Image (cartoon, rainbow, N blue to C red):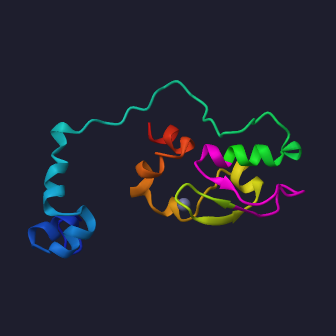
Amino acid sequence: MTTRPRGTMAWLRDHDEERVHAYFGSREQWAAIGGWAGFEEPRPPRTPTYLDHGYDEDKDPAQWTGHDLAAAAAFRGGELLSPAPEDIRTAVKWRCGLGHVFSGSPFLILLGGHWCPECVRDPAGYSRQAEHNRFLVQLLD
Ligand SMILES: [Zn+2]
């Protein structure tokens, strides 16, 4: 399939530089990938670990305060911009470490694990986001 007209190897063979650039970045970046001889199969650790979500997960969500929500936001490098709502399913405003303002309920953010909808669409920027987002650091290690 890769050598068929819409395949990645066909783009290289046929000097379709526009597609090579869009998919690999450049012909040089493709060449830097290397062959299978140097490929190492990912071997995740066999010992389960827990992620730190930046707040006390043993605390009853009905008891969450503005401090709990702000601490969870700070752990992700951002901040809570609204007062804590009465109901954890009520949307409030947050700002991520890159300055994007978005809405989400404490339920969605803390229990659902969601965060900035702009940043999550930029996987190539995860390393840069991890400079201020301690939650993300755990996932990239
Ligand atoms: Zn963001």
Image quarter in which the C terminus is found: top left
Magenta extent: 73-93
The residue lying at 77 percent from left, 64 percent from top is: 91
The residue lying at 52 percent from left, 59 percent from top is: 98
Q: Position of residue 15 (x, y in %)?
A: 10, 72
The residue lying at 16 percent from left, 38 percent from top is: 37
Viewer-proximal residue, 26 or 36?
26
Image region (quadrant) for ligand 1: bottom right
Please tell me whether residue 33 is drawn above or below residue 52 in the rendered image. below
Task: Please indicate whether residue 82 sits to the left or right of residue 129 in the image.
Answer: right
The residue lying at 82 percent from left, 36 percent from top is: 59
Total labels drawn: 0
Residue 10 is covered by the magenta coloring: no
Dominant secondary structure, magenta: loop
Q: Position of residue 111 (x, y in %)?
A: 73, 48
Please tell me whether residue 56 is drawn above or below residue 30 in the rendered image. above
Q: Position of residue 5 (x, y in %)?
A: 19, 75
Asked where in the image residue 48 lies, by quadrant, the reply is: top right
Task: Please indicate whether residue 86 sits to the left or right of residue 136 in the image.
Answer: right
Q: Please, which residue is most extreme toward the top here?
A: 47
Q: Position of residue 121 (x, y in %)?
A: 49, 63
Image quarter in which the N terminus is found: bottom left
Viewer-proximal residue, 115 or 96?
96
Residue 89 is covered by the magenta coloring: yes
Task: Please indicate whether residue 34 sits to the left or right of residue 106 in the image.
Answer: left
Task: Please indicate whether residue 113 sits to the left or right of residue 33 in the image.
Answer: right
